[in-house]
Image: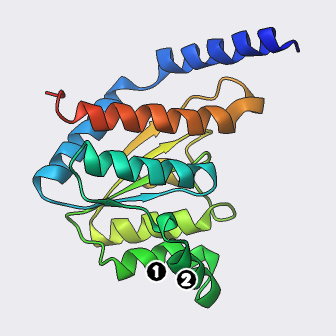
Amino acid sequence: MESSDYIETYLTETSQIAASIDRKALSAAISELKSLKSRAGRLFILGVGGSAGNASHSVNDFRKIGRIEAYAPTDNVSELTAWVNDASWEVSFLEWLKESRLQARDALLVYSVGGGSEKVSRNLVLAMDYAKQQGARVLSIVSRDGGHARKVSDVCILVPVVHPDRITPHAEGWQAIVWHLLVNGLDSHQ
């Protein structure tokens, strides 16, 4: 495929996602975050791979722009790798949330391409299940069929799949679009 054809295809797919993403889920996520902010809850943001990079960037935005206390376990590589080494990758986020004393007033925001399952991103699955056990709200921005995140999230924003070869770039790109929408929508949402 010529690069000009690829560019047109990719941007057309991006437009298709923009046209079909669930506006009610976006609005519900803004409402959840406004509620979190009003109860002085903390926002814990989880992601793996490119989604971990998005988690780090969005912590900055939720803290500075949204004025919500926010953290990502992947921001402290020393602590994260200690949990991985001493416990396991599967429980690394779970143990970090326990040490952070996750409470019912807090919320978990998960960025994931597939949403986690028993075989893939089990660390996310265990963290989401723990958050639910603690009474914390769970929000997610995921793609494919949403995986475990779609099953347990109080609000799941599903990035539609428009082409099977570009699930990951669209999912991770849309994580950024959505969190920017959410952060900046906190003050303007009625």
Residue lying at 55% horizontally and 72% vertically, measured from the top left? 77
Residue under label 2, please give it.
Answer: 83
x%, y% of residue 100? 33, 77
x%, y% of residue 177? 46, 31
Residue lying at 49% horizontally and 71% vertically, measured from the top left? 76
Residue lying at 40% horizontally and 71% vertically, measured from the top left? 130
Farthest-out residue, right: 1
Within the image, what quadrant is residue 178 found in?
Answer: top left
Within the image, what quadrant is residue 83 found in?
Answer: bottom right
x%, y% of residue 8? 71, 9
Quadrant, the C terminus: top left
Regarding mark 2 in the picture, which secondary structure is present there? helix
Frontmost residue, 178 versus 129: 178
Mark 1 → mark 2, Cα distance in angstroms? 7 Å
Give the numbered dot on residue 95. 1
Is the residue marked by circle 1 packed among few (<14), some (14-19), or many (20+) residues within 10 Å?
many
Regarding mark 1 in the picture, which secondary structure is present there? helix
x%, y% of residue 142? 53, 43
- Residue 159 lies left or right of residue 41; in this view the side is right
Give the residue type that dot 2 points to.
Answer: Trp
